[in-house]
Image (cartoon, rainbow, N blue to C red):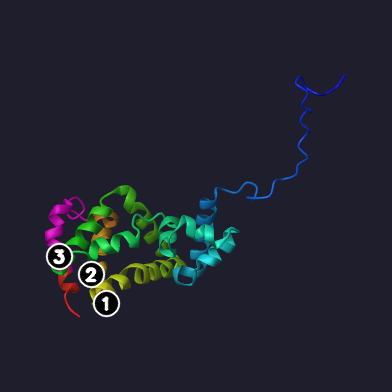
Amino acid sequence: MSDRPAGGQPASEPDSGRRRPGRRPGAADTRGQILAAARETFAEKGFDKATIRGIARQAEVDPALVHHYFASKEGMFVAAMELPINPDDVIPMITAGPREEIGERLTRFVLTMTSDAGARQPVLALVRSAMTNDQVVAMIREFLTQAILNRVAEILRIAPIRMEAAFAQLFGVVLMRYVVKLEPLASVDVEELVPLLAPTIQRYLDGP
């Protein structure tokens, strides 16, 4: 009796175990592959020395694929660290509009963004890691200074130390609200804090 099934087509041969060329067996989707490689590379080299080409090599993909999924190294860092902000989106929003209102915009943005538990958790997780890991400290420092603070300082034409002082003040408020949970600071509404803090942040930013 023939082993052809009804219809005349040959029966399927057993799988020889040969693999089709392409993605590595058991690998995640390409975007996930790249993010995993990015986390390793950023942790090992820091934000400054990590490169898109190096991350692509680690992920075993073409660098063009990295550019396909992520517009920039900053965007890849944000996705890899699951941060709630992308500098390319946030910086124009903060710097646009009247200069005398930048303190208010920056204060409102930071406090509103961190008021969402899902948004602030990755940030606080990185901070906790930084307390015991020098590599994480370096990575965060390089990202903050190069991707955010220095860029804003350049746009506003102010000394970087002014921008760093403003950010440090706001970051301290976030830590007091959500880590130390100092009352009544921890439970007061954002709209009560903005007019209290914004004038001080504006004073940091006013000047050459």
The tag earlier along the polypeptide, 1 or 2, is 1
Quadrant holding the N terminus: top right
Residues tagged 1 and 2 counted as in contact (Cβ below 8 A): no
Residue for badge 1: 161
Q: Secondary structure at mark 1?
A: helix
Identify the residue at horizontal 35%, vertical 59% (top origin).
86
Answer with the quarter of the image where residue 196 lies: bottom left
Q: Secondary structure at mark 2?
A: helix
Q: Tell me which segment is drawn in magenta.
A: 182-201
Answer with the quarter of the image where residue 134 lies: bottom left
Identify the residue at horizontal 35%, vertical 71% (top origin).
145
Q: Position of residue 100 (x, y in %)?
A: 13, 68
Quadrant holding the C terminus: bottom left
Q: Secondary structure at mark 3?
A: helix
204 left or right, relative to 139: left
Of 187 and 114, the residue lying toward us? 114
Residue for badge 3: 101
Of 170 and 85, the residue lying toward us? 85
- Mark 2 is on which residue type? Ala
116 left or right, relative to 199: right
- Mark 3 is on which residue type? Glu
- Badge number at residue 25: none
The tag earlier along the polypeptide, 3 or 1, is 3
Label 3 – label 1 distance at C-alpha = 19 Å
Confirm whether the magenta stretch covers residue 198.
Answer: yes
The secondary structure making up most of the magenta span is: helix
Identify the residue at horizontal 11%, vertical 60% (top origin).
195
- Mark 1 is on which residue type? Ile
Residue for badge 2: 166
Of 29 and 104, the residue lying toward us? 29
Label 1 – label 2 distance at C-alpha = 9 Å
